[in-house]
Image (cartoon, rainbow, N blue to C red):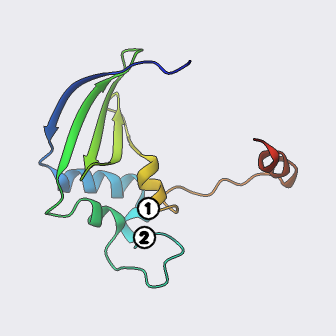
Amino acid sequence: MFKKPFVLRARSAYRDKRQLRRDLEAAFPSLAASGGAADEEEPDTKSVVAKLLAKQAFVEQLRVTTATGVLVNVYVSNGEPVAMHIDEREIVPTCQLLMRCPTALPPLLTHAAVLDILQGCS
């Protein structure tokens, strides 16, 4: 009901993987140091971003225009969305990237009373 269509303007191979990796690691320093999900027994020494943007990875840039006219650049690595630039501002991680590295963003602290309400919602 509320979903609005978007327009895919261009889809092309993205060649500057190093710059994308630097942007992600600068915006989210925990991505540079993390080896993966928190529940892994033996964390890998390579960072999540290094694994996603490896030399053999195929990285695409999708230029999308939303229904409100906002230009969004979506970066996709091997078919998995990694990050977005919204209106050429700062880089934003996707849910896929946050699932691979849940420590990329700082934890959200709430009051115990609010937490009870949030846990009870459907």
Tell me the residue at 21%/39% (across/down).
Answer: 61
* Residue 71 vs residue 58, the one in the foreground: 58
In the displayed structure, would residue 41 be above or below residue 64?
below
Tell me the residue at 35%/45% (across/down).
Answer: 83
Label 2, residues with CA under 10 Å away: few <14, some 14-19, many ≥20: many
Quarter of the view holding residue 87: top left
> In screen coordinates, is 17 left or right of 36?
left
Q: Which residue is mark 2?
A: 36
- CA gap, disc 2 to disc 1? 6 Å
Q: Amino acid at mark 1?
A: Arg
**Closer to the N terminus: mark 2 or mark 1?**
2
In the displayed structure, would residue 87 be above or below residue 42?
above
In the displayed structure, would residue 60 be above or below residue 36?
above
Q: Residue 60 location, x and y as percent?
A: 19, 43
Tell me the residue at 19%/49% (across/down).
Answer: 59
Q: Which residue is mark 1?
A: 100
Mark 2 touches mark 1? (CB < 8 Å): yes
Image quarter where the C terminus lies is: top right
Q: Residue 94 location, x and y as percent?
A: 42, 46
Quarter of the view holding residue 32: bottom left
**Element assignment for label 1:** helix
> In screen coordinates, is 88 left or right of 94?
left
> In screen coordinates, is 83 left or right of 22?
right
> In screen coordinates, is 5 left or right of 58?
right
Q: Residue 91 location, x and y as percent?
A: 37, 42
**Element assignment for label 2:** loop
In the displayed structure, would residue 64 be above or below residue 85?
above
Q: Amino acid at mark 2?
A: Gly
Q: Residue 118 location, x and y as percent?
A: 78, 46
Image quarter where the N terminus lies is: top right
Tell me the residue at 18%/33% (across/down).
Answer: 11
